[in-house]
Amino acid sequence: LMTDHFLKHLEKEVSLAKRAGEYDHGIKTVSGHSVVVDKPRSFCFRGLEEKDERCLLYKINADRGMNSDTALELYNEAKGLEGDAGDNPTATSTGGCFCDGQREGISSGFYIDRRHDIFKEVPRMFLIINQGRTSGKCVVIRPNEGKKTYSKKWVLGKLINGAAKLSLCTDVPQAIETWQKEFVLADRPSSEGYQRYCYGRHEERFLFGGSIIPILNKILVSANLDGLNMAKKDMTMPSIVRVEPSDKSQHYHAETNGGNSKEGEYLANTSVMLNFNGNGITETPAVGENVAHEMLGSSILRGIITKCGNQRGSYVTQFTDGCNIVMNATEVIKAKELFKEEFRKLVVKAKVPRADASSIGMISTVNSAAQSAPHIPILGEGEHHDTDEYERLFEEEYDGEVPKILVGLEFPKRFLHWYSESVSENIQIPFWKFVLRKLAEKLHEEGAMTSRELLNLKKAEQHKGKKHTVVVCG
């Protein structure tokens, strides 16, 4: 029931986004000056049912601001588009851009809030980009908050003609200098202000990822303060969020070009087998070629191209879980690159024979071998009796890698009270932690095995296997 409610909520949000012209598959994207994903926390919430499935909690460190160089690039791009349009539809000084029957003249450019009695450290800077006649939206950019999208009506009513009374900057170099000054001032946590109404660039966000689909219903129930009562209209629902770490491509480039001659030899000897050209991919994807697809920032599925592009350049791919995914040319090329990357890891790091590493049929064997490694609980022996942080009962050390693209669930930023038995009083915790703790508490009450209990069970089984081993001497 809870899952159905979530899907209906998601469908409604997608419909509204389509209507507003902001549809991006219902997924919000975390972006900014820099985005870094920390090593996740790992939880085994499914006990004996699925001992190798892990729910992961990712911490995202995002600098949501925009420096003056990037702002100037966007400004020049907007002005260039205006010039290409001929009649300058996105920049008028007296009106002339029509939207919904209203005369909405908004010039694309840098704007300044000159209320010096309020903003004493630095004038508040804006870059407003009018999306043109065919859109009712403007992109509004701030040095400390990055890009946001608002309706033209809102921009006119709140910013240009509202209390802010923004002024269009005609001196672009001066605007850039002031912009950078505010960008530097905003180099602090988002909870800390540097002047009235202005807060820092740096924020922390937390995403649930990994194998969350099997426990999605339990997660949603844990987020509902009324339990299973579905009558409450303002039930807290998570957003689907996509994160692409800004430093990931540079890190991978350094890793693959670090002068490892043995790795180069491995890859050189296998480029023909995998149908890769000198750039790592084929010129035109073909039926039968290997691809890989990352699911929810955790599992990587292998597959092949089963049907080649039609006139629209679409490809049908089939994966080891039986699902078929239609990809465009760009997506299928990326899928081929991911397969090559996984192949490299298996051959170079795991020392898997090249023929096996390139085989789709062998991936389940390789994965199960990797998953058979012991999972180490965070809490030591006996420590689970002394904690009221229930999530730690199921937490294990994480030894995997951070995915290059992560998709997960993010709950709204808010705080709730939780009664702490260790201090005998209510404490404030963020909502994501409330959901995590409530989920773990419920599972613990239901008798789910903790990480320590699973490890002890595995040790007992191994000991029993050794005890019954028969050695035959010749």
Image (tube, grey):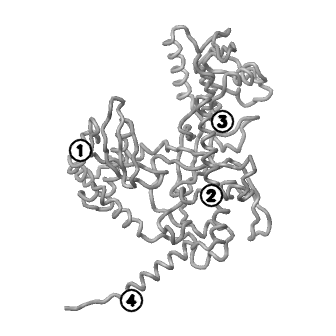
Q: Amino acid at mark 2?
A: Ile
Residue 11: x, y in percent? 60, 41
Question: Which type of secondary structure does the marked residue at label 2 adopt?
Answer: helix
Find the distance from the CA under tag 2 to the CA under tag 3: 39 Å
The answer to which of 223 and 60 lies nearer the viewer is 223
CA distance separating discs 1 and 4: 49 Å
Sequence order check, earlier mark of 4 and 2? 2
Alpha carbons under labels 1 and 2: distance apart: 43 Å
Question: What residue is pinned by disc 4?
Answer: 467
Residues packed near mark 3 inside 10 Å, few (<14), some (14 to 19) or many (20 plus): many
The residue under the point 26% across, 59% down is 356
Q: Quadrant of residue 199?
A: top right
Q: Are marks 1 and 2 in contact (CB under 8 Å)?
A: no
Q: In the rendered image, which residue does mark 3 sit on?
A: 185
Residues at badges 4 and 2 in contact (C-beta under 8 Å)? no
Q: Tell me the quadrant of the picture where the N terminus can be found.
A: bottom right
Which dot, 4 or 2, sits closer to the camera?
2
Q: Which residue is mark 2?
A: 219
Q: Return the disc, 4 or 3, that comes first in the chain's sequence.
A: 3
Q: Is residue 418 left or right of residue 33?
A: right
**Residue appearing at x 62%, y 39% in the figure:** 13
Three-letter code, disc 3:
Leu
**Above or below for 140 versus 2:** above
Task: Give the CA distance from mark 1 to mark 3.
Answer: 51 Å
- Report which residue position mark 1 lands on: 275
Q: Which mark is residue 154?
A: none
